[in-house]
Amino acid sequence: MKERYPRLEINLASLKHNVATVVEKCGSYGIQIAGVIKGATGLPEVAKQFDEGGAAFIASSRLEQIEDAKNAGIEKPMMLIRVPMLSEISEVIRLCDISLNSELEVIKALNDEARVQGKLHKVILMADLGDLREGWWDWDELTDVAEYIENKMINIQLVGVATNLGCYGSIEPTVDKLEDLVKLAEKIEARIGRELEYIGGGATTSLLRVWDGNVPARINLLRVGEGIILARDLQNFFGYDMSMLKQDVFRMKAEVIEVKNKPSHPVGTISIDAFGHRPTYVDRGIRRRALLGIGKVDYGSPDDLCPMEKGIEVLGASSDHTIIDVENAEKDWKVGDVMEFDVCYANLVYLSNCRNVNIVFV
Ligand SMILES: *Cc1c(COP(=O)(O)O)cnc(C)c1O
């Protein structure tokens, strides 16, 4: 049988190696890892590598991914990392052991539902330290909520405080920010009269502090996805040596459907492209180009793709086609050949969630 393209190949052994390496390195600082599976759409095979590699929790922003992980037989505690919607409360209690929260109204609903289902649900309260996505901005308000949960709620257990950085506001998890989080935890602890079990210092970007060896001692939980599955990101964006991690977890492969010499500048009156934009084009004369049977619908933005082939250049794409300049390619590209690309996080969230893309485990 012919192999089907386009495909996303996932190297499970490399993924497990990366999970185990990050778990061990963080473990040496007393930090547990919540393995975040949403980057690869929570594919159960991916979730299993997080489990077997030693993550303390399996975490996702999406309940259906958590449900799939449970159905795949994973018995680790499940963590919901997007603050819950009021419309999903009963599922949150049914599927998750622990959730991140930023609204008292939602936590009250969780408490009511946990009572109905006869469960004890754990919550971590989110503090916004400047990234400006989820979390309490006002520390006094957060501390009041913590006290309220501690004294008034029977089916909710307050287990910690955490923050999210490096998402909307692109804020770096500096030592100062993490120390602020510890101060906040201590303020809550003073109010409720006991220690919190978890202080969650962020996601992938907080690994930089682990690599620097300067994470404040009381930070003991990180929620990590990207830095494990796409190990090269911390190297590419921040210049850190990530050579102990495997960089070949994901490969996108697409088939060449046309090869021709054509002008590099469109011919005629230029108006708008397939996505309503008005792009500009450089005239480089007649060039040899290959067309691939894959497009933006499958991987998002063509600018994020990293070709593995020598001498090729991604020119652009529409929904279902990708245009590659092969004028200076080492290889003489022919119809039916397969081109290989490394992908970044933004490509991966589409590829792993796309019906057209054949997912293959290697
Ligand atoms: C997505 C997400 C993470 C994981 O982020 P990575 O960059 O993949 O490590 C952690 N926490 C929250 C709240 C998230 O939404």
Image (cartoon, grey):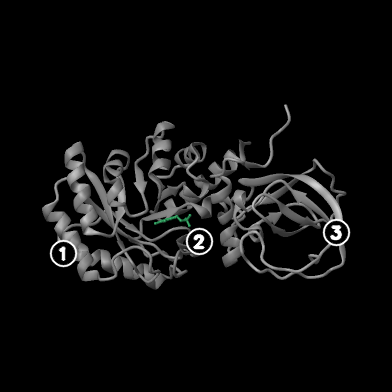
Circles 2 and 1, Cβ within 8 Å, touching? The answer is no
Label 2: few (<14), some or many (≥20) within 10 Å? some
Which of the image's four quarters has the C terminus? top right
Q: Position of residue 86 (x, y in %)?
A: 27, 51
Residue 246, can we see it?
no
Name the foreground residue: 258 vs 304. Answer: 258
Is residue 362 depicted above or below 194 in this figure?
above
What residue would you read off at disc 2?
Answer: 211
Q: For the residues carrying marks 2 and 1, which lies nearer the camera in this image?
A: 1
Left or right, 174 with reference to 347: left
Q: Earlier in the sequence, mark 2 or mark 3?
A: 2
Q: Earlier in the sequence, mark 2 or mark 1?
A: 1
What residue would you read off at disc 1?
Answer: 191
Helix, strand, or loop for circle 2?
A: helix
Q: Residue furthest left?
A: 152
Q: Amino acid at mark 2?
A: Trp
Q: For the residues carrying marks 3 and 1, which lies nearer the camera in this image?
A: 3
Q: Residue furthest top?
A: 1
Q: Position of residue 128 (x, y in %)?
A: 33, 67
Is residue 31 depicted above or below 143 in this figure?
above
Label 3: few (<14), some or many (≥20) within 10 Å? few
Rendered image: mark on residue 262: 3
Q: Earlier in the sequence, mark 3 or mark 1?
A: 1
Q: Residue furthest front?
A: 269
Q: Amino acid at mark 1?
A: Arg
Left or right, 296 with reference to 71: right
Q: CA distance from mark 2 to mark 1?
A: 33 Å
